[in-house]
Amino acid sequence: MTRVKALGYLGIGVSDMAAWEEFANDVLGLATTQRASDGPVRFTMDDHDARIVAHPSGEDDILYAGWEVDDAAEVEGMAERLRAAGETVAAGSTEEVSARGVEKLIYCEDPDGIRTEIYCGPARSGNGGFQSPAGVSGFVTGDQGFGHIALGTSDPDAKLDFYRNKLGLLLSDHIHLSAGPDATMTATFFHCNPRHHTLAIVPAPLPKKLHHFMLLTESLDDVGRALDIAASREVPLASALGRHTNDHMVSFYLFTPSGFEVEFGWGGLEIDDSTWQLKEYDGISLWGHHRVAGP
Ligand code: FE2
């Protein structure tokens, strides 16, 4: 059955475009590929034209997620799958297809109203390699997409059903989190390619739909240098350096100019779905990730 293969791009609505461009370029090391006057700014981290797109629409939250499939037939296959599951699916207009720089595009909404786009044929720069303005040696992308996202929700059943049974994401594991003195809640992690997880669902109505997005670097030194840059620029740290239990990633979390977080990491586990066994954990970190600020 057709299913999505990678999380290829992320659209965010922001209130302070100048702050975002400086943060993306100088702290995260993403390169600006296009800046429309009073319009979106597109950032890349590899040979794609756009991995993160900031729109000056003021929500300071996720606007859309772009899920990649192999070709136009698979885009149609996903449209059929989603419609058969009761979703309202529309084809992207000529303007939308052009704006995203893709070959073909359909979309629907997830249970929390996040525009969920399925596409094929992303535009690539082909100009001989990505150069990070902050000196990041490289990001792990390719068939693993741009990274991962973590979403909160007040309707976990619908959210899990949408991503697992409708988009076709595959279960990686669960982490049982403390949610007060006598309460726990279970976060669910999904993969759709060798990246251990491309999506995490937190079963709680968080202040923003997007809790964080994650970028994975090629080198541990990239993570250390980003920590130094963030400290020198007094970017607020949300969680200190640590290593996750489930994907073994060494990472830290910053608050973005929009208030949601970005996880910046190295060393994420790659898995093979044909042999992967569902796992359960009682904590998110082997060490570190001590909360510095925020909820
Ligand atoms: Fe994460």
Image (spheres, grey):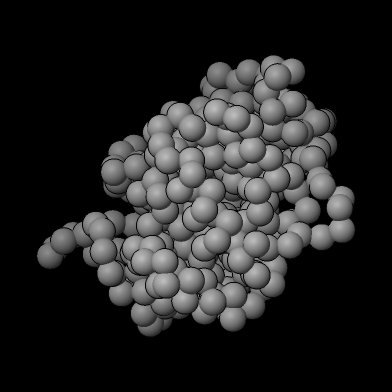
Q: Position of residue 260 (x, y in %)?
A: 38, 50
Observer able to see residue 110: no
- Left or right, 234 with respect to 13, comes to left
- Quarter of image, res 138: bottom right
Position of residue 220 measured from the top left corner of the image (x, y, whole percent): 58, 80
Residue at figure coordinates x 60%, y 30% from the top left: 37
Residue at x-position 45% and y-position 48%: 19
Tell me what residue is drawn at x 68 percent, y 63 percent: 132
Choose between 89 and 115: the one closer to the eye: 115
In the rendered image, is residue 31 in sight?
yes
Left or right, 238 with reference to 248: left
Image quadrant where residue 184 sits: bottom left
Q: Is residue 44 left or right of residue 73?
A: left
With respect to residue 135, does 49 lie above or below? Answer: above
Q: Quadrant of residue 36?
A: top right
So how many labels did they put on this image? 0
Q: Quadrant of the N terminus?
A: top right
In the rendered view of the protein, which quadrant contains the C terminus?
bottom left
Q: Is residue 284 above or below residue 52?
A: below
Residue at coordinates 36% horizontally, 79% vertically from top-left?
288
Residue 169: x and y in percent read 59, 47
User: Residue 66: horizontal and vertical position, in percent?
Assistant: 63, 39
Front residue (pair 5, 30)? 30
The answer to which of 109 and 51 lies nearer the viewer is: 51
